[in-house]
Image: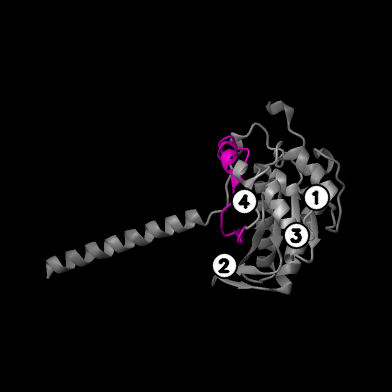
């Protein structure tokens, strides 16, 4: 009987350890994309005060209707210097850009999930990741304040090559020939459906759309992003706004 008790306790111990290890791994995999600012000589998003210190002209606005030309202006000022012409070029170059901390991979987490990216790749410049994380955290905070539940939004488009843009323009009349998506500064956030984090279901919700809109407008007023609401694609087209680098850090 004593041997049976010891064997049972050992089995219980292994089970508890397995549960703990699973919880740690699950929590790690669900963490949002984290960035170590020490890896970057300057952090032009966290530098702050984009209203007075943006790398390209911008004025505070309480609506989200920024045209493609201003998205392009900020994307070219802050993003990749050379867009990818083809998907083959992306495959050839992206790993070196990740190693140099010029691109960061975006993965599913508790703040946002990726939808099927048929015409883009899940990569952004570090500043855009900081902005995306801040937007998602503010959005979920608003949901909590309104007791609307635990939800995250979907990213439907991220970094595009010129090749994918051409393919997309054949199907989507909203897709301009020149896109800020080329530069790793821009993402599309769907407001059509949201992921319920409690039961893993996908649902539409007018109330949640409003809180997402309020969050986007709030950050647009602070000049932290540019945005336009695309009704045909049911998404917010968003580009990060960066501040001028702090020369004292160079």
Query: Is 98 part of what is drawn in magenta?
Result: yes
How busy is the neighbourhood of tag 4: few (under 14 within 10 Å), some, or many (20 plus)? many
The magenta segment is: 91-117
C-alpha distance separating marks 3 and 4: 18 Å
Front label number (2 vs 3): 3
Q: Is residue 187 visible?
A: no
Front label number (4 vs 1): 4
Is residue 203 placed above or below 114 in the rendered structure? below
Using the image as rendered, state which of residue 177 and residue 32 is in the foreground. 177
Is residue 131 placed above or below 116 in the rendered structure? above
Q: Position of residue 222 (x, y in %)?
A: 80, 50
On screen, residue 7 versus residue 194, left or right, reads left
Kind of element beneath mark 1: loop
Q: Position of residue 110 (x, y in %)?
A: 57, 60
Q: List the residue tagged with mark 2.
A: 197
Q: List the residue tagged with mark 1.
A: 222
- Quadrant position of the C terminus in the picture: top right
Q: List the residue tagged with mark 3.
A: 236
Kind of element beneath mark 3: strand
On screen, residue 56 versus residue 106, left or right, reads right
Q: Position of residue 16 (x, y in %)?
A: 33, 62
- Quadrant position of the N terminus in the picture: bottom left
* Residue 51, image quadrant: top right
Q: Position of residue 126 (x, y in %)?
A: 64, 42
Query: Is 240 part of what is drawn in magenta?
Result: no
Front label number (1 vs 2): 2
Is residue 186 placed above or below 8 in the rendered structure? above
Using the image as rendered, state which of residue 246 and residue 241 is in the foreground. 241
């Amino acid at each position: 009987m004593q041997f049976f008790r010891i064997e049972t306790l050992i089995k219980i111990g292994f089970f508890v350890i397995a549960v703990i290890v699973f919880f740690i791994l699950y929590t790690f995999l669900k963490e949002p994309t984290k960035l170590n600012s020490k890896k970057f000589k300057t952090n032009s998003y966290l530098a702050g005060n984009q209203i007075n210190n943006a790398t390209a002209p911008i004025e505070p606005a309480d609506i989200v209707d920024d045209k493609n030309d201003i998205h392009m202006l900020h994307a070219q000022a802050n993003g990749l210097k050379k867009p990818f012409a083809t998907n083959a070029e992306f495959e050839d170059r992206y790993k070196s850009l990740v190693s140099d901390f010029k691109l960061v991979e975006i993965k599913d987490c508790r703040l946002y999930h990726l939808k099927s990216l048929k015409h883009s790749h899940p990569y952004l410049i570090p500043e855009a990741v900081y902005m995306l994380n801040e937007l998602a955290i503010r959005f979920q905070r608003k949901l909590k304040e309104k007791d609307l539940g635990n939800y995250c939004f979907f990213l439907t488009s991220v970094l595009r090559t010129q090749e994918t843009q051409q393919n997309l323009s054949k199907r989507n009349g909203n897709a301009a020939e020149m896109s800020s998506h080329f530069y790793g500064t821009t993402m599309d956030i769907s407001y059509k459906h949201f992921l319920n984090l409690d039961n893993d279901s996908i649902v539409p919700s007018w109330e949640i759309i409003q809180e997402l809109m309020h969050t986007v407008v709030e950050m647009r007023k602070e000049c932290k992003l540019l945005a336009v609401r695309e009704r045909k694609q049911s998404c917010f087209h968003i580009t990060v706004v960066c501040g001028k680098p702090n020369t004292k850090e160079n």
